[in-house]
Amino acid sequence: MAREITIEEKKELAKILFTREHLDQKVVAVRVNVSEKTISKWVTDGNWREMRRRLLLTKEAELTNLYEELEHLNTLIKTNPTKHADSKQADIRIKLTSSIRDLETKLGIAEIVESGIRFIKHVQQVGTTEQVLEMSDLWNSFVQASMKK
């Protein structure tokens, strides 16, 4: 016999559906089998609206901005009579390239996560809530293992 889904598992699934899938509260309530009032409380208490908003600013956009800053800095350096960076410019360049490298590494993980989200969306459409939760747990484990490499 299948185990009962805990309220915490329902809450986690609801959070994913609301923040990442941008489903409205009524749909989320039906999907996770809780009342709209419960979803409303979770959204408010967990600040899910703010999470949803923040997820709109993607790492790709941040990476683009960093590359643009680096390009601008390099153009500025080329206009110097020596064609070399001064110590301040060199420090900025080091920090920008380090940030770019870190973000590109995170983007690799983000691509894994994005694939998982698409897969879990598919499971939501064709599977049971228990299967969605099980796949979510397995995928989370995979992402955690990938981040440690």
Image (spheres, helix red, strand yellow):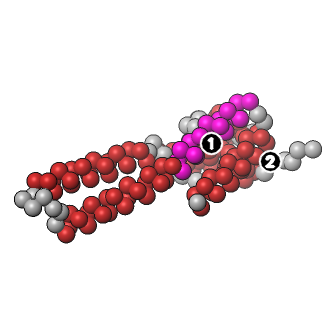
- The type of residue carrying mark 1 is Gly
Assign the C terminus to one quadrant of the image: bottom right
Left or right: residue 36 versus residue 66 is right
- Identify the residue at the far top of this view: 126
In percent of width and height, residue 105 lies at 47, 54
Foreground: disc 1 or disc 2 = 1
Residue 128 picture quarter: top right
Q: Is residue 117 magenta?
A: yes
Residue 119 visible in the picture: yes
- Identify the residue at the far left of this view: 81
First along the sequence among labels 1 and 2: 2
Q: Is residue 8 magenta?
A: no
Image label count = 2
Residue 121 picture quarter: top right
10 Å crowding of disc 1: few (<14), some (14-19), many (20+):
some
Give the residue number, with chain letter if any, for mark 1.
116
**What residue is drawn where x is 70% and y is 35%?**
124
In percent of width and height, residue 129 lies at 76, 39
| Towards the viewer: 8 or 82 | 82
In percent of width and height, residue 57 lies at 42, 45
In percent of width and height, residue 59 lies at 43, 48
| Towards the viewer: 35 or 71 | 71
Secondary structure under badge 1? helix
Range drawn in magenta: 109-126
In whole angstroms, how far apart are the C-alphas of marks 1 and 2? 21 Å
Give the residue number, with chain letter if any, for mark 2.
5
**What residue is drawn where x is 43% and y is 58%?**
102
**What residue is drawn where x is 23% and y is 65%?**
90
Residue 40 visible in the picture: no
